[in-house]
Image: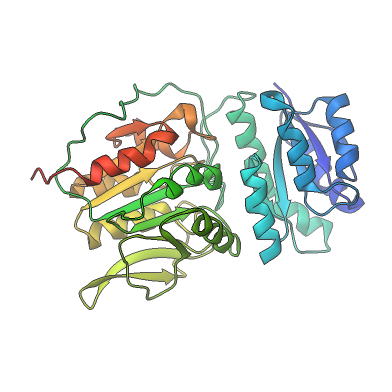
Amino acid sequence: MTLKVLVVDDSVVFRSVVRDLLNAQPDVSVVGVAANGRIALRQVELLRPDLLTLDFEMPELDGLGVLKALKELGPHAPGAIMLSAFTRQGARVTIEALHLGAFDFVPKPQTSSPTESRHQLQRTLVPKVEAFALARGLRRGKERAGTTGSAAAAGKSPSRAAGPASKVPVFKLQPQVVGIGVSTGGPEALLHVIPRLPADFPLPVLLVQHMPPVFTRSLAEDLDRRSRLRVCEAEDGQRVQRGWVYIAPGGKQMKVVQQGGQPTIRITDDPPVKSCRPSVDYLFESLAETYQGRVLAVVMTGMGDDGADGCQRLKAAGGTVIAQDRATCVVWGMPRAVVERELADFEVPLDDIPAAILRCIRQKVLA
């Protein structure tokens, strides 16, 4: 089935670059272009696109205004992938856009060369368009590797039955830390988890959200405002403390090591893992070593299989793994990889994840 796309941007050159790039993709058809948000909304009514590529800064009606209008259309509204400015203000607006229902975003190329813009968007935008088509059931296919923040698209093969959230977990070691991995759909999904953890939460939380630099700090600030726990973008050398949530900086790797007898965060420029930096696998493997398997891992919505190898390492060391269930994922990719490798102790709907975390960390040591 062909994915119908409307390209919305006030730049004639950029509209042309995106239109030509997407029209060159299999089963994608650009059905129209629009120079501002008001024109875009009229085109949505006339052309019935499945997806908008949407710029933020436009005359008459900006990208956020378009998203708010689309939200009023209900479940049959087209999706949107945002083209975001690589600035602090652009990052803050991007987080708001994701909360308003945008499927995902890509940083807008910072170049005046149409050729270079096309090359960048081939790497960043095209995988997310493919993932949207798969998530909406407009295309079938196996998952494929991708770039940071867009590791792979979700397929549609059946999963094994989900485990009930009320089931008592059986694990060898009581957790001393929580590790969370998430990608596409993550900022909105995290609002259902982090702000719902109690102020007396007894463990630290280490979190990887696939995002470029700049955007992870805005995500941390947004979650910190909404949460009873302290949420920050992690810094090299920070001591890991209970009641804190540490988000890996975009474009860097985050691990935890023992330093002076205390778990300490190290932020590195180590290479990407599965094209991801930050990488869930990279973090989880360090947690398995530093905490000797006393880890609760949570793998949430996202493309690709980042986190599956780390979960295998954690399980072998005595850890426990929760995977978000298929029905509540924006993209069932990362959790799917964990489930299909039979690494998930529990498959849990998004809204049940906070309670599942609390149940797991309150269990007594069984071995």
**Coloured how?**
rainbow
The residue depicted at 67 percent of the width and 38 percent of the height is 129
Q: Which residue is at a point 78% across and 52% down the rendered structure image?
A: 56
**242 in relation to 309, above or below:** below
Query: Residue 90's image quarter?
Result: bottom right
User: In the displayed structure, does residue 38 sit left or right of residue 106?
Assistant: right
Taking the image as shown, residue 118 lies to the left or right of residue 354, namely right
- Residue 91 position, x and y percent, is 65, 59
Whether residue 69 is situated above or below residue 63 in the rendered picture: above
Is 143 placed left or right of 239 in the picture? right
Residue 33 in view here: no
Percent from the top left, x then y, of residue 28?
74, 31
315 vs 346: above or below = below
Quadrant the C terminus occupies: top left
The image shows a total of numbered marks equal to: 0
Q: 301 or 357, which is in the foreground?
A: 357
One can see residue 352 in this view: yes
- Residue 305 in which image quadrant: top left
The picture places residue 82, in percent across and down from the top left corner, at 71, 47
- Of all residues, the one furthest to the left in this rendering is 367
Residue 224 against residue 23 in the figure, above or below: below
Residue 364 on image: x %, y %: 13, 44
Q: Which quadrant holds residue 214?
A: bottom right
Task: Name the one closer to the observer, 326 or 338.
Answer: 326
Q: Nearer the viewer, residue 336 or 270?
A: 336
Left or right relative to 51: residue 162? left
Q: Residue at x 49, y 59 (%)?
A: 224
- At 37% from the left and 73% from the top, the residue drawn is 238
Image quarter in which the N terminus is found: top right
